[in-house]
Amino acid sequence: MVSGMKIGAWSWHWKINEMSADEHIILRSVRQTATENHKECPAHHETEAIDYATAHVFERKSVVPEHELLETALVYHRGQTDLPRLKAALAQSAQLVATENGYSTREILATELALIAAVTEGKEAVPPLNFSHRPAGWLSEDQQAALQQVLQSPDRITSLRGLAGTGKTTTLKELKAACEKAGYSLRLCAPTAAATDVLRQEGFEAVTLASLLQRELELADKTVVVLDEAGAVGIDDMRRLFELTKSQRLILCGDTGQHASVARGDALRILEDHSPYAFGRLTQIRRQRRADYRRAVELAANGETTAAFAQLERMGAVSELGLEELHAAAARTYLSVVEKRKTALLVAPTWAEIEALNEKVRRTLKERGQLQGEEQEFRVFDSLSWTEAQKRDPRQYQPGLVLQFHQPARGFARHESVEVDLATEDSLRLRRADGSVSSLRLDSGRACFEVGEWRILPIAPGDKLLLQANRSRQFINGELVEVKALAGQSILLSDGRALPPDYRAFTHGYAVTSHAAQGKTVDEVLIVASSRSLPAVHREQFYVSISRGRQRCHVFTDDQDLLRAHIANSSIRTAAVEAVATPKTRRALVRQLLAWAENFRRLVSLGQVLRQPMSPQKPIAWTRKVRRHHRYEYHHHSRTLRV
């Protein structure tokens, strides 16, 4: 009997003998190049590789396992370094911090601690916004209690935590009225253009967080900054906001149970879990009209997704079908809802599933004659979602890739799209739409373009599109629009607008991701999650998906048991303060932070009390009441702080 090793050796020998002459030449060339590169290995290669890996992986995570850093570093200098030397360079890196879960960076840890310190410093540091305000009687008990928590708080940084569909907008309107009555002005912002647009539609003057931070406006002393959808803000932008508003009141509105930011760090969750952060809670869900459906959303909002799924099963709102029938059934249900002139969303976890659903819906519409007029093919931009480190690395670029500029840069116009013709050591040769060629030097600064590919998208009058890029206030990333007519390279929309020839960031919009669905409300929401997409399913994705509907929710899957298991998993990312080497180190670190912040807070509180004009009605009682309440809150949080 031949051993497994001998069989493997014989099989490899047979494959070598079966190779053509050209394949032998290629193999010898690869071996020679790898050998030469390995011999040439300069000592700085390991440092360069670790620096690149650090910039790449920590753009979207705060803590990563060692193997992820090493894998990225090995690929960066493939064939020019080896694992032992990379491990040694990793251990010697001055910017990295070893943790129980792998590595973080000193910058990330410092940023997280700065956020915690800012909240701690702000405890009992300011007079209440409007202590005597009586909320409108038509508000619910939880809305009134949440408002009073914020209006009566002497903390500089406070929050309204609202679950999906709890009437946060109504509460914000009452908050605005109460603040203005006391002489304060509200400045609202949100992390995305879509969330900002929702605020504007509700009558608020609002800007994106990026716009607020870029302008670095001088804020008046009696300005109250309100950040909506704060759960979708990373630690770096949150720290910049804290620095901008260090002399103003700041109110964070968000729900940490929904999707977090793409950028690194779940800032709001870190504050909730690791600082003496006090917030008003909106707990009564109003969006869902049926009690049984509302109960399912309540369970999901509280993290009990398995129980929420069981509730949907009892409602008959889960269908298990074969893979072939799955998309067809979801498409039929979607179209039947739309035919009743109701609003509907198809939500799926992956783009592969979304494209399959979009194709199924369009095919059915064509068969019914509901996509009228001649179909036309458009070349659209499909982003590759590169990190900044990838954009700076010329070796990442291949001919045919597309750069789409979102800001003017070195002779390239805003919104211009160009194709990569050639990548050199530190620059790109780019071909413009008119055929001319220009160069772009890659430097260490933040890139003002996205990298992607062209793909062909067929469009007909009647199609629904999902917009995927912002353009001032005219077009919003995540917006759903309907095509009325095609006019050359322009697309006329049913609302009177037109997508110009240089706006090519869109796709079919019948099915969307849960990220695109967040913030939207429809009559019926239909969730599709086949076994092929389950790795992208988690607790937060499920909660966001099922909570979009007013009247009905229905789940389509080909494996109920597997889906039930996946929705119990959370996508919460580990914070650096949660992963620092040992529990003893963590406790000592936080103790030092809180001791320093407590001393600072006492000085600030004393100064505020001495400067504050006392109300003629019960001034002493008010001071004692507020201080007694918040002293308890502060020490309670300090004792139960989990790091």
Image: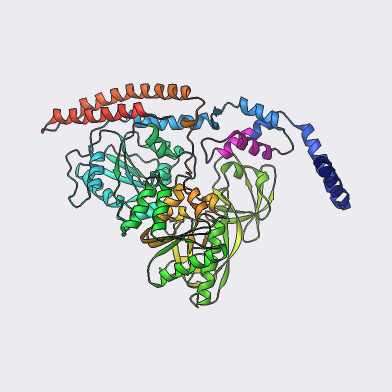
Q: Residue drawn 29% across and 45% down? A: 186
Q: In the rendering, at what x and y percent does residue 486 appear?
A: 51, 72
Q: Is residue 49 magenta?
A: no
Residue 599 location, quadrant:
top left
Q: In the rendering, at what x and y percent does residue 516 appear?
A: 46, 55
| Image quadrant where one finds the N terminus | top right
Give the side of residue 480 with respect to residue 16, left or right: left
Q: Residue drawn 36% across and 46% down? A: 228
Q: Residue drawn 87% across and 52% down? A: 18
Q: Residue drawn 26% across and 30% down? A: 630
Q: Is residue 77 magenta?
A: yes
| Image quadrant where one finds the C terminus | top left
The magenta stretch is: 50-78
Q: In the rendering, at what x and y percent does residue 391 appear?
A: 60, 45
Give the side of residue 266 with respect to residue 405, left or right: left
Tell me which secondary structure the magenta stretch mostly adopts. Answer: helix
